[in-house]
Amino acid sequence: MTIDQKTIEKLRKEPDLPDLDLSWLNPKDTPGITVKVGKRGLTLDEINIGVYGEVPDLAQHGTTRVRGSTPRSGVVRTAYFVPEKSDIWADNATLIYEEAVQRQWSSATDIPWETVQPLPDDVEEAICQICTFLTEVEFIAGDAPGQWLKQISPDHYEVALYLVSQVMDEARHLDVFRKRALVNGCGLLEAQGATRGLRNILDAKDFTEMSALMHVLAEGFVQTMFRTGEFIAQNEAEKTIFRLCAQDESRHVGFGVMHLRYVLEHAPERREEIHHYLDRAEQLFGHPTDGGGTSALQEALMITMGGGKAHIDKGAELAMALTKKQANEYMHRLEVAGLGERRYRMNPAFGLLLDPPKN
Amino acid sequence: MATFPSVEWFEAVITVANEDGRLRKLGTCDAVMGVKVLDKAFEITFEAFDCIGVREIPSEKLAETDFYLEMPFETWQGMLENIKERGGTPDRQYTLNTIDFLDPEGFAKSDDQSKKDAFYRYGQTFQQFFNASSEIETVFAAPQPV
């Protein structure tokens, strides 16, 4: 194919500059901003000032427009977001997110794996059964918040960042428990399958329902269990795993409690609805009649906490103390959130374990 | 050499804990921790990456901290001696987690569970703080009840 001389001349010429708009250089609605770096570095709280810190009660657009930027017409919608701030908000979301970023750790390099040494078979198998259960549980703990990410508006971005940090935490928990199960000659044992209680979290149709079931109830229980890790652990590596996971889990519980408090303060008409979610969850979660199969976990805990099958009585005593602590701390957190009356309608399986109220 | 419990003892621990970045490595920690030993009470403040100070306070002010740690003097002594003997890595029965779990009332106390959760959120930081006491010489002197 030949190209005529005229076309060649045209291609050789520098293209004409297009007409420039440059209207974005004169923002009318977006004021300038100056921030100071604080002791913790430049955190979200430091930049959340002026219009940038004004979180709307209603997210009214379905686009990717970020809070504080200038709107533009003709932009395509990308999602249906949860519009109501009170449905997803927690006042500590930025604090918890920044803390999560600061307090990250690596399962590859921050665990003293060299301290894992051969253990008696029953203890090693019990540890591996616990790790099998926790690996499964952490999958769900990551999937559940992950399902909600696409529904958080850019106007409420702090919550999205927190949720992402939780997904990262759960990914690390999943990998560290899997590594522990595989590192010492035993491997993964019996899959428990998502129990009905855990399935209930995945099925939540409402963010507050998901948060109350997962952050306050389930992760509260798991956090208490991780704190007893000193008894489950047989070496410094396992102690470190449980301590670090307990810290992470505490952030998730902290978000959930503050979210529940925010909902009850800003949408008090939801109180009975939340009780309904908890009624159902308490029936399913960790209930002795739950056919989902947590018995292997309970037995494995008794063996590790007792120090072997021969001392299972001692382990049962410690496991009972753990369950009692779990129930009481769950109740205390509900009190902090503003749901103190839960004490009088809690599933008896938990309610019977409660200490008398302080006042 | 510093006497436990005293402001001087906590200041010596703070110096060790802050000096080589061992707290910074663990990430930010924002909490006010109380410590009660017999009739003496202390308030220890953690801010951002450091422990920034300690002061003696009246016992009734402990309620204003995020949480406070309380146990018998002998148990404090046992824990700190074990930390010293083990070079900063206490045996299982002397870790903050274990002491808290085995005490039916809880070693970490607060009327507000969400504030008390700071004890767990920053657990490694507080454990490192007390582990730092292995690097100072401690004299134990039980305060006499008033």
Image (cartoon, coloured by chain):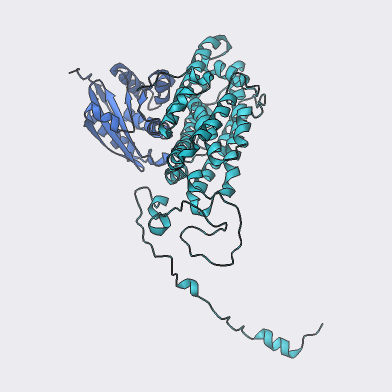
Chain colours: A cyan, B blue
Q: Where is residue A179 in the image (x, y as percent from the top left)?
A: 60, 32
User: Dividing the picture into quarters, in which one does residue B117 lie?
Assistant: top left
* Relative side of A314 to A10, left or right: left
| Front position in the image: A318 or A241 | A318
Q: Which quadrant, please, contains the N terminus of chain B? A: top left
Q: Which quadrant, please, contains the C terminus of chain B? A: top left
Count of numbered tags: 0
Q: Position of residue A4 (x, y in %)?
A: 76, 88
* Relative side of A287 to B117, left or right: right
* Residue A188 in view: yes
Taking A43 as reference, is A342 above or below it? above
Taking A139 as reference, is A317 above or below it? above
Which residue is drawn at the image coordinates 54% and 30% (left, top)?
Answer: A278
Which residue is drawn at the image coordinates 57% and 9% (left, top)?
Answer: A310
* Residue A233 in view: no
Taking A224 as reference, is A73 above or below it? below
* Relative side of A300 to B140, left or right: right
In the displayed orientation, state which residue is furthest to the right: A1
Taking A100 as reference, is A242 above or below it? above
Q: Where is residue A139 in the image (x, y as percent from the top left)?
A: 61, 36
| Front position in the image: A183 or B114 | B114
Q: Where is residue B126 in the image (x, y as percent from the top left)?
A: 37, 32
| Front position in the image: A187 or A259 | A259
In the displayed orientation, state which residue is furthest to the front: A269
In the displayed orientation, state which residue is furthest to the left: B146
User: Dividing the picture into quarters, in which one does residue B135 lie?
Assistant: top left
Which residue is drawn at the image coordinates 45% and 72% (left, top)?
Answer: A26
